[in-house]
Image (cartoon, rainbow, N blue to C red):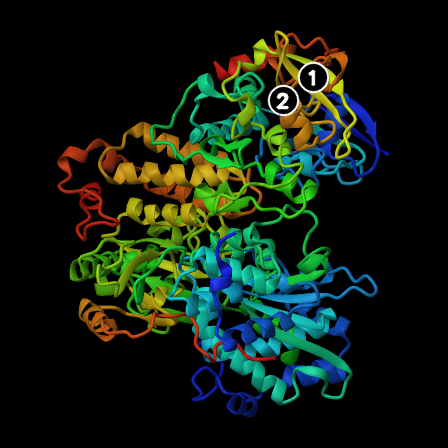
Amino acid sequence: MSDSNKITFSPESEALIKNLVKRYPEGKHKSALLPALHIAQAEFNGWLSAPVMDKVAELLNLQPIEVYEVASFYSMYNLKPVGKCLIEVCRTSSCWLRGAEDVVKHIEKRLGIKDGETTTDGKFTLKTVECLGSCGTAPMLQIGQTFYENLTLEKVDKILEEWKDAGKHSSYLDEHTFRNI
Amino acid sequence: MGRKLLLENDHIEGIHSYEVYRKNGGYKSVEKALKSMTPEAVVEEVKKSGLRGRGGAGFPTGMKWSFLAKPEGVPRYLVCNADESEPGTFKDRYLMERIPHLLVEGMITSSYALGANTGYIYVRGEYFYIIKILEQAISEAYTNGWLGKNILGTGYNLDLYVQCGAGAYICGEETALLESLEGKRGNPRIKPPFPAVKGLWECPTVVNNVETIAAVVPIVNDGGDAYAAIGIGKSTGTKLISASGHIKKPGVYEIELGVSVEEFIYADEYCGGILNDKKLKAVVAGGSSVPILPADLILKTASGEKRLMTYESLADGGFATGTMLGSGGFIVMDESTSIVKNLHTFARFYHHESCGQCSPCREGTGWMEKILHKILDGHGTLADVDLLWDIQRKIEGNTICPLGDAAAWPVASAIRHFKSEFEAYVTNRKSIPDVKYYFHCNNLDAAAAYSSL
Amino acid sequence: MAKVTIDGITIEVADGTTILQAARMIGPDVAPPTMCYYSKLKTSGGYCRTCLVEVSKGSEKDPRPMPKLVASCRTGVMDGMEVKNTSSEKVRDARAGVVEFLLLNHPLDCPVCDQAGECHLQDLSYEHGNYKTRTEFERRTFDKIDIGNKIQLHMTRCILCYRCVKTAEQITDGRVHGVINRGDHAEISTYVEQAIDNDFSGNVIDVCPVGALTDKTFRFKSRVWFTKPMYAHRNCDKCSGKVSLWYKGDDVLRVTGRKDQWGEVEEFICNTCRFDKKSTSDWVIEGPAPINRHSVISANKYAKLVKPKEFTLNDIKAITD
């Protein structure tokens, strides 16, 4: 067992996870695992370390392996550290048809990294992903919960500029994402 | 101009908000259903409407609803499948973003019909900003008495929740979605039992697509017959089509089923023609899973009839010369497109998204991607093309869930209709300049250019 | 009761019986092969697709054939159902495909694999596979992992049948190992390589159809076909104490559960019996183990054979040659 007792969630996050459990019938608290992992990832620098996952297991009263199984199945959970800004570029058919490769090449050149890598200063991670449902506004990329669509290389430059001094890790959620019950 | 049922009020400013939505006739179906109809009567209207599942399979919704088991004392659930992930499809996102209350309203009316007191909307994780929008809409619906206890004083109770996914196409398969909703890996279940008997937490459950549930609203408001009067034959009502690729006006269009494919591609009202007025080469008409068709076969059936945007017309000719309406993800490719490279993006997609439970899909999808990569890299042989054909044949129909079929069909159809292009890649590779494969690719598609010489 | 006909042989079985169970009742040469189904484990089966069969007649009431091949381990019989196993070319073709898929990333390191000789994947390939390899890509590999000091996980050999996961779930308390990652990256793992610290963890070795989970106390001690299985028992406060002892000369090289003709253990045994009791004096010897279909020990298959009526072995050879 890893050292989960060193991990502490903020009181808000812990309360939110407890609140999420109310969405399911009694005894079905495992259903809160996916949102809880998102919350954990948002809180701990955009990725899930083993101690963080163990802590989630503890909060939801699950076996750690149940958490690892789930965390490693879904592509949005990062099991390795990522840069402050995680750039996810869609590369499937419609985006490819409209120039996604040029976008990826451009970012690789600008940041000096390849797909899947993080810049040495820890600011950016580039990840190519499969269809994000933005085919009509292709090409596109996602950073946190924001979709940047109808990309041109100039737009990409602006986005990189916008994110170069990000203070916090890009996140899929914010404090308003989930409604309290 | 075709009739619009779901996007009728799309142009109204602020339609995403409760006040504007309500002022424009929102939540009328809930009032009508709860106050003047029995649940059975609502199901009856949906049956009469001929509505078919809009997620891709096209199964009659009324029939699906009537399969729901109703044992005493066991809760039933309605789960909305908003895990829209089929490449080329973005209609549900559009609907939820623009008119979230339509989905909430549809969920309430449908839950009432099914006798469900709890509903979940499972939204793919990548759509987190949509989750926020839905949470807001649900919150407003609670505040205004459309959700919660004793709705409209009728004694009917309903709680509605949003559940987030975390990046897995397979969760669009209904039993995988239920597994995921239970907090597990998104592995499809082996059927039977079907969700209608044993679904969420082993309780009877109906899983419907966003658009399907939204369509229940006009069906209840105007009656099933009125809905069935739109469209042709068994393709009733309207359908949201996500149009993308090489067209002038990509976007979501609500069409009356029965519009011709030609009109849909070329009319200003819809796609507006091919980008830069190039020639049409091929279309994937219903999301990445359905067979790709070359221009001549998508515009006209093999027997020379005009191809229409209906379940039946698109399927005319079977897989030999036809395709499927699927999810309505309409991807258009112009004459410069390499079918092989496009296919590789699909193959990579299915490889990436295979859950890994059953062996043909787990191993076969990766194998096909590798062979396509090899062909694109200029190292393929004619035997590789035959091998691809044989692999897809051995995956199709032999897997637990339809992902295996979905991975096989694009490969089969690309080889069936564009074999010469594969051959150009493998036989003339030395004469093709720079087919070196990035992730990728070069803008210049040498092989495609070669094959069209 | 339901009457079902499999490859031309009719048998009457209780309602709720699966096609596979019915076929097994007829006999080993009619029963479809299985790699993931395990009758002692609930919800096992359905994954590997080796037991696919063709249902040429659904039932007496609804005689329509089923549109797709079905997993016989997960499909119940209906009265009047007619099933084609090896008599269906579609089935033979699909099965050969499944074998190819299972071998695609398998290392084929049988010469140094402790499972060789009692490996179900070897048997399956031999009986149902093609003779040619069509893949040329590098195979997926993983590092070996020790799960505690008695069990080794050789993930490269794994075919993801999920039997070990279900064993851990159903007969041990507090599962610590499971399937992580997705698709063809999926692997059995404890993630942080924790030992399976449980009295019954050793059973994952017995249920593994290939050499992915092996007994470290038996590692490289002998080829299995040079060992002799004897039935023995002892008084054990944790399990039934009924085991097979595998002898080479006078030495007990390993202890396993007793396996039936389908290669499934009859009863799960505890780790004390399996790993710690390796002297003849620990046991009451009952005598030589009976013939086992899934072992080289029973290469001649002394059991009474029931041949499929509509199909002979020569037909297979003709297709696969």
Instruction: Determine if residue A140 is in view.
Output: no
- Secondary structure, mark 2, is loop
Query: Residue at position x 64%, y 26% from top?
Result: C276
Q: Residue furthest front?
A: C281
Residue B191 position, x and y percent, is: 66, 47
Residue B187 vertical placement versus C241 (above, below) = below
Residue under label 2: C86
What is the chain identity of the residue bearing mark 1? C
Tag 1: amino acid: Pro
Query: Between B315 and B128, which is closer to the camera in this rendering?
Result: B128
Tag 2: amino acid: Thr
Residue C266 vertical placement versus C15 (above, below) = above
Residue B195 vertical placement versus B22 (above, below) = above
Report if the CB atoms under discs 1 and 2 are less than 8 Å apart. Answer: yes
Quadrant of the image containing the C terminus of chain A: bottom right
Residue A148 position, x and y percent, is: 31, 71
Corner quadrant of residue C298: top right
What is the chain identity of the residue bearing mark 2? C
Is the residue at mark 1 from the same chain as the one at mark 2?
yes
Estimate how packed mark 2 is, as few (under 14), some (14 to 19) or many (20 or more) residues with alpha carbons within 10 Å. many
Corner quadrant of residue A161: bottom left
